[in-house]
Image (tube, coloured by chain):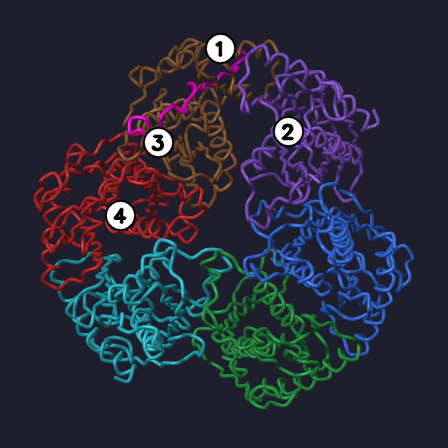
Chain colours: A red, B brown, C cyan, D purple, E green, F blue
């Protein structure tokens, strides 16, 4: 049995509160069970040096966990003076995932900066970040279009992410922290609204897996992504 | 006239939501108008090196602003690789303010670590941090007492903070960002439940001030602190 | 047509020169086409702090590229003062991959430190690092067993890695730099001697992919891994 | 009784040696008892990025302690790789204090950089830094005027600083290290030649204070500042 | 007796393999006994800020040791986040030595960047770096001339380096690690093809030395340099 | 003609003021012309990790320049967050030079830490640092002996340093900044009281030199060192 009697193919209760903070061009507090991530999208009228004068924009992300978002307190990265390898890996993943559904030329020479900050962690923070960041990005882009800054929508499709894993040999969807800590292998799957893969990251943690197990996990993920895509639309009032 | 027609001696609407996150031993989301700070208190069963074996505890604080808590996006300190001078100044102030009302011997050889993270900023973040951190600390200490870890309460008194300043020559209480940016002189006042001063930090920003103005500002602050102390008690259900 | 007329399912010419340097407990220069990585394994009689006194060992890796291993010179990370996110991501991957085939208890309280330094880069450096590092590790462990330090072999299986990708819609094995730069989607696959997956990391770079394409890529990777496993045995003289 | 039989309202013997080093545009070695601070003022023909093209100048400060200025040796900040929170707090205070008496437009697009380096410390280093830095600044500005670079004096008034504190319940002026270490509450007061407050920084260290005590301390500080302002004029030969 | 029965005035067997890596404009693997250093020369079409617009070029060097080039593993400087004092000292020496034989005006506004990376260390790595770097530089410059980028050769002379030292009171040439560790005094001598000194760096390590000993060491070095100059020409096929 | 009509073999006027600061166990302000260096010696009752439990002591040095010790202001290394290569090179040289005349076993398990801080620079700061540091060290050691902490003197001999160089082809002693900037080759020579060499560091800066020139420079240095050794004794009142 999973915690709270959840079915193997069930997502945790998920809500997305848009407009959670007021300064960001797009702001969403995504809550996936006890994992709460604040996703803020900022429009910056500049691009990184390598894109200057190329007539296209950029989408990038930063990720952080509040020190006491975790069960026991973690060090504050700003105080330690550097971001961990895990943090950098996650923020690179978020940025790549979002760029996969953006037409950077249609964005013009400006940047969309996504800040995903974990207020409370209970597993699956990188997937919640991607799912929430897309909604925040959509709101920010909508603002640019309403103000007439952009004439065509640079967002080509939705993108969302979910985790799957083998817990005691059983494939389950959307692992919480306890399941994640005890699981043999876990995957983070990022997919588009059209059902295409953007990222497939599977890692054996103590237990390697074969092709059949991989297929089961992918199947489970596809089911979860379908639900997330619907929840994203709902959050945007579509 | 002040923004939203506020009286010169009126605080902004202030709420403190206890238990905002679930892992911290004490967690409070303080909202002072549009300034929102998440204050988490952690109990760590260790003390800094300079206190090892001395039979007393420690209380300290860290402070941070989410990159898009501000009107325009600020750099992430973890990404830049260091905390700004302003951040360090503020977290040192929070720590000193809390320690002023603690009996560190009664705490035993453990640390109370306060994390004040600004989710949304509109002026007065350091004062909100102190006021909220005291409530988070009180909850964490209460937990230690209920579990029988501590037999006597190491918290000797309340502590709260408020800003005052001269805006166009008029003394006003609890400045928001717009008032703060335009004010000639501002002060942050930290006081105890007994009405004693813990910190008095006045700074001329463009306009120096005389003894009479200083007295007016202190008077105004005392009124504000009185209200904050009552709100703290209320948040704790007392 | 692929560069040098290579077949889609063909590895680049691959050699592993054991004993390339003399101080390391295990040393292998792996050359996969024009990608040359020096893999050195060091035995350290200590473990990281979190493992002290737990009666088990640790396997970890560090990765670096010489500044002029690349087509145009890259900054030296030691001079810049930090490792890039990409470097950290790769060295974490190498470490996890090796640990997946180690019985850390059988290693005793010591560390196996793998250093993978790219002397010349032409795509696929992380995969070559994993494949070569396993051979370097096997030599180092063999030394411990010959000297009677270890009585049972802590290495449970082989591990090797290969890249696959979609170039102009065609699935190809073991991409060189030019193919990698132009490919729509690429994957790095890490597998054991028993044919189990350790890591599956697929990324859409400009072009998302569907389930059928994913299956084709996995199939191709399995073929490549089989050849790599045989070459590892051969390098060890088995 | 205070050390050396000093009266509660007496400053320590204070001298300011102008022209202590020869390269700086203004150079003063201030000695307040055993606290010796070298204050050098440099004129730089550039402004920080945020002021470029705005037709005004900037005044800023840096502060440091030589490792063996203190009773026991402190780490060298350059070797540790960062400035402490205390250092940053102090140099920000010095900069703000000086700017309070400057007409930055009259300075033109150039910077006045103040370096306050403590050669020997015995309490009150930040106050001595401010008092000495103003004299160094005045000399540097005088040079600009004599050379005809500036036509009107950008310095609007004097500024000086002194510490006061409660030692065993008694309010005393200009604390040395021993008094500072043992005091219950201390304040650093920065005032202009016109008797206006620039900074009022009071901190309870172990003992909170009330309004009456605050008033006594401010009174004492005003007396000290009056003497310092006269000594500054004397150092400038006025 | 020296290790391997070497005569006091004999160099270790020395080879220089040109074209060791393919991307660098000049690439040489120099092997002096068991000391192996990869010297890569890169042509960069830019100069440091202090030379911009001055119509001249720059020659500079960076140096590094692979973590397991040494008998016991050394920390990776990129992971520690800074280069050691020793590393910086050596790379400054290599840069100065090369610049001594360059006509920087004849190089045009471009930089020659030398990367000396020690693959295996057995004493004398800085001398091998200089000797090998000159050959790599000569190849890179030859390329510029063949492509018609440069019309006159900016390299005015050869430069090579060798170590000498007093081992148990005897002056010996080209010390290996064991001799270096046990020697009383050692010197690194850098000389030009014309027999002029570029650098003379002698250090007493446990045993000071007199003028006569200094003369003997210089004599020995001159003999070694003569052989190195011939080997450099041979490596270039002259 | 040299500046101020100085003879080629003449030192600049040199004074050493002992007891310049009061907290250090040994404190000397050395003034060599317009080069002023404060040399403080601290006795620390601890040794670096690599010497723990070995029954011997350590002597080490740190060096720094105040930002405005130079003709134009240099960046503060503490603010930049790292020491330059030049700074590290110099402090390593000072440490080695002092250790050359110390019996580290006779010092016991404690460290002598030398801090050489340049208050004003006009060339030759590293040589002045060594010459002054030895006097500061001698005073600190004398204190240990007077207090009975040490029974035998760990200082075996004097050590002093001077620069020499070729200015327009003429060999001159003790170069000031202007001469140093314009010289073709310069050397820093460190010698003991017994006339032995400790360090010989010659560098061609724009002009290489031959054996005869080297001999002339060494001769000149020996004359300068003889004078410095006498001045050291005088400063100690011997």
The quadrant in which the C terminus of chain E is found is: bottom right
**Secondary structure of the residue carrying numbered label 3:** strand
Disc number lying in front (3 or 2): 3
Q: Is residue B155 magenta?
A: yes
Q: Which residue is mark 1?
A: B220
Q: Which residue is mark 2?
A: D104
Estimate how packed mark 4 is, as few (under 14), some (14 to 19) or many (20 or more) residues with alpha carbons within 10 Å: many
Task: Output the chain of dot 1.
Answer: B
* Residue D171 x/y as whole percent: 65, 17
Answer whether labels 1 and 3 touch (C-beta < 8 Å): no
Label for residue A98? 4
In-image side of C49 versus E57 (left or right): left
Estimate how packed mark 2 is, as few (under 14), some (14 to 19) or many (20 or more) residues with alpha carbons within 10 Å: many
For the residues tagged 4 and 1, is the chain the same? no
Res. F71 in view: no
CA gap, disc 2 to disc 4?
46 Å
Disc number lying in front (4 or 3): 3
Task: Output the chain of dot 4.
Answer: A
Answer whether labels 2 and 4 touch (C-beta < 8 Å): no
CA gap, disc 1 to disc 3?
29 Å
For the residues tagged 4 and 3, is the chain the same? no
Disc number lying in front (1 or 2): 1
Q: Residue at x 15, y 42 (%)?
A: A228
Q: Residue at x 42, y 11 (%)?
A: B226
Which region of the structure is painted magenta? B145-170
Q: Which residue is mark 3?
A: B40
């Amino acid at each position: 049995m999973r915690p709270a009697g959840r079915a193997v193919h069930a997502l945790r209760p998920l809500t997305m509160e848009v407009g959670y903070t007021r300064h960001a061009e797009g702001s969403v507090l995504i809550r996936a069970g006890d994992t709460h991530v604040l996703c803020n999208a900022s429009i910056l009228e500049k691009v990184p040096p390598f894109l200057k004068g190329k007539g296209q924009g950029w989408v990038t992300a930063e990720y952080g966990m509040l020190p006491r978002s975790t069960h026991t307190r973690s060090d504050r990265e700003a105080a330690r003076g550097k971001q961990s390898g895990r943090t950098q890996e996650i923020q690179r993943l978020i940025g790549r995932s979002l760029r996969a559904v953006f037409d950077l030329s249609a964005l013009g020479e400006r940047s969309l900066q996504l800040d995903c900050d974990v207020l409370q962690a209970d597993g699956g923070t990188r997937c919640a970040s991607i799912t929430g960041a897309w909604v925040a990005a959509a709101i920010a882009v909508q603002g640019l279009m309403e103000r007439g800054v952009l004439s065509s929508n640079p967002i080509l499709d939705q993108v969302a992410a979910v985790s799957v894993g083998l817990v005691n040999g059983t494939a389950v969807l959307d692992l919480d922290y306890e399941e994640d800590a005890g699981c043999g292998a876990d995957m983070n799957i990022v997919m588009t609204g059209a059902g295409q893969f953007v990222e497939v990251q599977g890692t054996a943690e103590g237990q390697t897996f074969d092709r059949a197990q991989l297929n089961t996990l992918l199947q489970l993920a596809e089911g979860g992504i379908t639900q997330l895509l619907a929840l994203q639309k709902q959050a945007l009032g579509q």
